[in-house]
Image (cartoon, grey):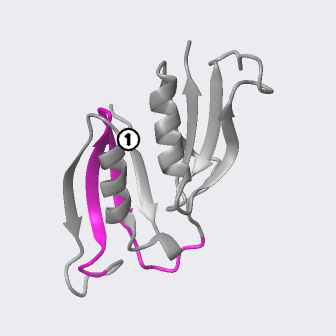
Amino acid sequence: MKTTTFLTFVGDQCGKGEEAINFYTSIFPNSEIKNVIKYAEGEPGGTPKLIKYGEFILNGTEYMVSESNYNHAWTFSPAVSIFISDSSEEMIQELFDKLSSNGGQVMVPLDSYNGEGDYGFGEKFGWCADKYGISWQFVVTK
């Protein structure tokens, strides 16, 4: 059995999937786009410019992606996020800064607990959403 995170870009984010996965694979080490299949002309759910199905890898973890131009009543939610942990504070800070900038949003600043203590699961924690609406949590591990 295998589980994989599947990101569906709809609504205002539809048409930004390929830009997003190019951005993600450019900032995470050990990352690549495995494949991208576009919709055929006239195929339901999209246009030839949209991703019907794609796979990409971020630091060794596989993700799937699709775009749909149907009028869905949902989009990405901060309740589901991609969780990143590393012992390198520099690496975590760099990724946090890149993902939260240029239209992203900081939901919890990357810092220690109340600016002075340990969270119990890591020395520093932060939470942001990127400009595509994907939510990311970060922890600097001990």
SS of the residue under disc 1: loop
Q: Residue at x 44, y 30 (%)?
A: 91
Q: Residue at x 48, y 18 (%)?
A: 87
User: Is residue 21 shown left or right of residue 140?
Assistant: left
Q: Which residue is mark 1?
A: 4
Q: Nearer the viewer, residue 12 or 66?
A: 12
How many discs mark residues in the rendered view?
A: 1
User: Is residue 12 shown left or right of residue 125?
Assistant: left
Expressed as whole percent of the image width and height from the top left, the position of residue 64 reads 33, 51
Q: Nearer the viewer, residue 133 or 95?
A: 95
Q: Residue at x 30, y 35 (%)?
A: 29
Check the image and name the residue furthest to the top: 142
The quarter of the picture where the C terminus appears is: top right
Q: Nearer the viewer, residue 134 or 4?
A: 134
Q: Over which residues does the magenta segment extend? A: 47-73
Expressed as whole percent of the image width and height from the top left, the position of residue 67 reads 38, 68
Q: Residue at x 29, y 82 (%)?
A: 47
Image vertical order of residue 7 relative to residue 31, above or below: below
Which amino acid is tagged 1? Thr
Q: Is residue 84 visible?
A: no
Check the image and name the residue furthest to the bottom: 42
User: In which quadrant of the rendered view does residue 48 lie?
Assistant: bottom left
**4 in magenta:** no
Image vertical order of residue 103 relative to residue 87, above or below: below
Image vertical order of residue 27 relative to residue 37, above or below: above
**62 in magenta:** yes
